Amino acid sequence: MARGRPARTVVYRRLESALAELRTRLGGLPSPKESEYVWSDIWHLEAHHSTALEGNTLVLREVEVLLEQGRAVGAKPLKEYMEVKGYADAARWVYGQAIEAGDWSPAGLISEQELRHIHHLAMEPVWGVAPHPHATPREAPGNYREHDIRPFSAGMTPPPWPQVPSDVQSWIALVASVGQEHQDGASADRPLPEQLAQAHNAFERVHPFIDGNGRTGRLALNLILVRLGYPPVIVLKRQRPEYLRAMQRADSGEYGPLGELLARAMIDNLNRFILPNIAGPARLLPLAALVDDEISLVALRSAANRGRLDAVMGDAGWLSTRKAVTKYKRSRQHAGRKGRR
């Protein structure tokens, strides 16, 4: 039978298996102080892709130079540099607060004060050079909208602006119920990624700010995720059509497509950034976490299947170690040299 895209239930199982590995054998997510280089890589990528979803045209290299050196390279409008800077400022705050909570620690997973602070951090830099043309001073970054928003092209209509404060409180209660259920270990009607998809969609349906709701919603989602011990999500700019379709289906109460997209994004961040950087050379990891510029996932799977790579079959597929992969790559190089003689 031809192998295709794994079923949604398989994706959820793979996520839980990878998270179990992270928690039980690797001590959980690293703090920003413990593994600054891990978080900085995620930080760059998230600031690039999340702003690109909203139309920002900076390429990843321009984002990296801006965030690491404070220099604007290229000839893009100042507004675009400020969009990335604001998002990055907010993301850095989110990662720090999520794992090393300070004075902002709420009783639940996220507070109204935190939500408004995220929006202020994300939008203040761009607001300084290109404020929303229809905003009043009372709608500046960190403040709720006092305008109604037209229906979206897909048909969803955000609530009237006087309803926003109460709808935000309902959203905070929804998020808190997800966190409480997760903490209690209760058996949920839906997998956690789909509960998170509902929460993310519910925020975007409220659309509490006059601008910047997509960026703020993704940052708030990542704050919730990391507080639950999950990796942050990066929705890649090439996934924009899939993301929007999933959000539209969630508008009608179908949370599976968005939940699957979020689960895949968490797995990608685990395998690409977190597991390879915190696991020692002898730790068993999914093969996807052992891929590098020299060897592909397909090659590793083939070597494991043929017994050429020291690997074991786990619940979610083959597991091996960095040490074993290094040994296998050396054997390939040796075989290549012999073949050229």
Image: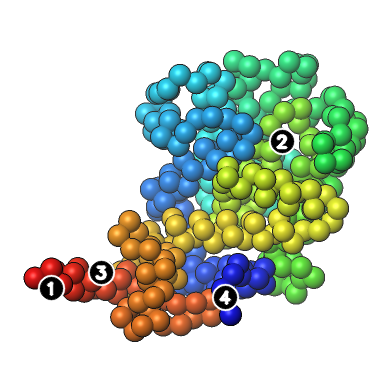
The CA distance from mark 2 to mark 4 is 41 Å
Q: Which residue is mark 4?
A: 2
**Residue 34 appearing in the image:** yes
Within 10 Å of disc 3 (Cα), the crowding (few <14, some 14-19, many 20+) is some
Q: Amino acid at mark 3?
A: Lys
Q: Which residue is mark 2?
A: 213
The CA distance from mark 1 to mark 3 is 14 Å
Secondary structure state at the residue bearing disc 2: helix
In the picture provided, is 140 more to the left or to the right than 129?
A: right
- Total marks shown come to 4
Q: Is residue 27 above or below residue 75?
A: below
Residue name at image x 52 percent, y 50 percent: 100
Callout 2–callout 1 Cβ contact below 8 Å: no
Q: Nearer the viewer, mark 2 or mark 4?
A: 4
Residue 329: assigned label: 3
The CA distance from mark 2 to mark 1 is 59 Å
Q: Which residue is mark 1?
A: 338
Secondary structure state at the residue bearing disc 1: helix
Q: Give the quarter of the figure containing the N terminus.
A: bottom right
